C-alpha cells in the first residue's frame, strides 16, 4: 500500500499546505522555503487545528524525510538543531512530517521534533494524521488528486455512486500512483467550478483523458457519479437532476482510434448538453478547439450568450508541461515502477536529458520506465536508448494513424514534402496536389482542422 514517502517532497509540501488551509484557514502563501531543506513560517495568531487551539506565536514546519533509517535520523537531527534556539520564544509548535507512527513513538525522534519541551504545546501531523486528513477532506482530494494514491484509493469511493457510474475504474485507479496535478489540471478544476463545463485540448499522450479521469476519481470519493460518454445520447440518458454527476465526453478514450466526426456530433448537441450542467452536474469534453468554437457560436447565435460562456472561458490547453511538472511525472513513474537501485541511478543521472527531450509525454515516460529501462544491459548507451524510446510513437498513436482516411494521410505526407518549418497554406496545397491520389475532395484547411491538436498544430 503506497505511503507518503513515495509522494515526493514537492507534492508533500502541497499536501501540508492544503491541510493547514482546510483545517485552520491559513493561506498557502504564508509558507516559505522548500520541504527538502527548510519550509515553514511563524503565525502571530493562534491556530485552530483538528479541534485544538495552538497559542501564538506558532512555529509551523514542514519536514520531508527521505532515504534509509540513518538518513532520516540525520535530517531530524539537523531540523532539531535549527529549532532549538527558537523554541523558547514559541507559544506552540506545529510540525508536518512524513514519519510513521512507529518513528513518532521513538524518544529520539520526539526529542529532535521538539515534542519533549515542557511548556510548549506541540501538534504533529505524521503519516497517520495526514492520511486521516485526506479521508475527511473531499476538497483536498479534488485539489490534490495524487493524494488518492496514499492508502487504499478503492476503499474511499462511494459504493452507491460507483455502482451507477460508467467510469473506467481500473484505468483511473492505475493513474493514481503516477498522476501529477499539473497547471492544466488546476485550470480545468477552476473552470468547472465556475462554469460547470471545461474543454481540454492538446496533442495525444499529454494527459487530457488522465486529467478527466482523476477529476472523476476524486469526485467519486465524494459521492458523485462519473460517466464516460462517447456520444451525447449517453449523457442525455444518464443525466439525473437529483444526483451529483460528472460527465466525461472524450472523442476517443485513450486515443485508440481517430474519430474527428465525434467532436462535430458533440458540437451539434452542445446547447442541450450545457443546459443540463450546474453546480452539481459538470461536463468535461476532450476535443479540438474548432468544434468548441463552432458549437458555442451556434448557441450564441440562436439562444444568446447570457447563460453560456465564451470559448476562451472554458478552453483549457493541456499541450504544455513545465520542467518541474515533467520532473515530478518522471519521479512518480520511477517510484511506481519499483526500480532497482541501479535503475533508479540511471533515472537520476539522465533525468535532466529525459525531462528536456522534445518528445516527452507522460505516456512515453510510463512506457520507458516500466518497459525498456528494465531491460537495458549494463553497457548500453542510455542517452541513445532514451532518445529512441521517447522518439517512437506509442501503440495508441500508431493505431490512431492507421485509422485515418486516405485524404488525411496524404495531408500528413504533403506536410513532410513541404519546406522546413511552419507550413503555409499555399505551400501545403501545392504539396497536397502532388500526393493526393484522387484529387482534392476539400480544401487543405478543412483537412487540417480535422487533424488539429491530434496530429498537427496550427500557429495563428
Image (cartoon, helix red, strand yellow):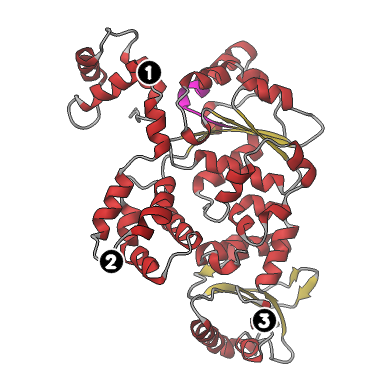
Residue 459 drawn at (x, y percent): 33, 29
Q: Quadrant of the N terminus?
A: bottom right
Q: Which residues are magenta?
A: 285-293
Q: CA distance from mark 2 to mark 1?
A: 44 Å
Few, some or many C-alpha atoms within 10 Å of disc 3 (few <14, some 14-19, many ≥20)?
few
Q: Residue at x 55, y 64 (%)?
A: 7
Few, some or many C-alpha atoms within 10 Å of disc 1 (few <14, some 14-19, many ≥20)?
few
Q: Secondary structure at mark 2?
A: loop
Q: Secondary structure at mark 3?
A: helix
Few, some or many C-alpha atoms within 10 Å of disc 2 (few <14, some 14-19, many ≥20)?
few
Q: Quadrant of residue 384?
A: bottom left
Q: Is residue 290 left or right of residue 144?
A: left
List the residue tagged with mark 3.
Answer: 102
- Mark sitting earlier along the chain (3/1): 3
List the residue tagged with mark 2.
Answer: 378
List the residue tagged with mark 1.
Answer: 405
Residue 343 among magenta residues: no
Amino acid at each position: 500500500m503506497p505511503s507518503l514517502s513515495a509522494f515526493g517532497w514537492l507534492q508533500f509540501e502541497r499536501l501540508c499546505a492544503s491541510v493547514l488551509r482546510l483545517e485552520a484557514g491559513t493561506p498557502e502563501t504564508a509558507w516559505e522555503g522548500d520541504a527538502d531543506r527548510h519550509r515553514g513560517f511563524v503565525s502571530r495568531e493562534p491556530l485552530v487545528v483538528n479541534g485544538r487551539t495552538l497559542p501564538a506565536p506558532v512555529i509551523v514546519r514542514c519536514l520531508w524525510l527521505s532515504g534509509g533509517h540513518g538518513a532520516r535520523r540525520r535530517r531530524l537531527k539537523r531540523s532539531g538543531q535549527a529549532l532549538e534556539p527558537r523554541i523558547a520564544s514559541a507559544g506552540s509548535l506545529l510540525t508536518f512530517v512524513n514519519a510513521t507512527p512507529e518513528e513518532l513513538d521513538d524518544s529520539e525522534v520526539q526529542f529532535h521534533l521538539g515534542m519533549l519541551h515542557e511548556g510548549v504545546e506541540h501538534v504533529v501531523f505524521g503519516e497517520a494524521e495526514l492520511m486521516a486528513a485526506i479521508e475527511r477532506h473531499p476538497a483536498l482530494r479534488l485539489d490534490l488528486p495524487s493524494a488518492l494514491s496514499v492508502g487504499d484509493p478503492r476503499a474511499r469511493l462511494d459504493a452507491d455512486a460507483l455502482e451507477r457510474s460508467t467510469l473506467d475504474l481500473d484505468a483511473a485507479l492505475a493513474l493514481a500512483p503516477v498522476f501529477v496535478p499539473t497547471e492544466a489540471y488546476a485550470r480545468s478544476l477552476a473552470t468547472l467550478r465556475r462554469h460547470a463545463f471545461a474543454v481540454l485540448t492538446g496533442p495525444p499522450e499529454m494527459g487530457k483523458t488522465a486529467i478527466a479521469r482523476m477529476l472523476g476519481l476524486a469526485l467519486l470519493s465524494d459521492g458523485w457519479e462519473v460517466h464516460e460518454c462517447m456520444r451525447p445520447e449517453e449523457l442525455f440518458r444518464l443525466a439525473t437532476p437529483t444526483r451529483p454527476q460528472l460527465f466525461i465526453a472524450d472523442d476517443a478514450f485513450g486515443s485508440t482510434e481517430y474519430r474527428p466526426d465525434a467532436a462535430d456530433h458533440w458540437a451539434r448537441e452542445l446547447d442541450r448538453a450545457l443546459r443540463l450542467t450546474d453546480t452539481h452536474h459538470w461536463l468535461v469534453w476532450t476535443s479540438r478547439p474548432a468544434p468548441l468554437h463552432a458549437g458555442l457560436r451556434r448557441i450564441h447565435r440562436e439562444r444568446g450568450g447570457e447563460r453560456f460562456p465564451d470559448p476562451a472561458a472554458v478552453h483549457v490547453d493541456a499541450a504544455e508541461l513545465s520542467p518541474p511538472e515533467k520532473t515530478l511525472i518522471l519521479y512518480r513513474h520511477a517510484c511506481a515502477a519499483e526500480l532497482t537501485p541501479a535503475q533508479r541511478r540511471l533515472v537520476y543521472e539522465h533525468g535532466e536529458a529525459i525531462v528536456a527531450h522534445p518528445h516527452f509525454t507522460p505516456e512515453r515516460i510510463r512506457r520507458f520506465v516500466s518497459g525498456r529501462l528494465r531491460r537495458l544491459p549494463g553497457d548500453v548507451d542510455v542517452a541513445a536508448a532514451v532518445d529512441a524510446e521517447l522518439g517512437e510513437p506509442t501503440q495508441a498513436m500508431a493505431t490512431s494513424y492507421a485509422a485515418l482516411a486516405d485524404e488525411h494521410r496524404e495531408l500528413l505526407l504533403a506536410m513532410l514534402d513541404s519546406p522546413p518549418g511552419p507550413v503555409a497554406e499555399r505551400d501545403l496545397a501545392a504539396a497536397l496536389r502532388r500526393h493526393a491520389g484522387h484529387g482534392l475532395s476539400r480544401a487543405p484547411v478543412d483537412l487540417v482542422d480535422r487533424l488539429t491538436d491530434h496530429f498537427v498544430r496550427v500557429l495563428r
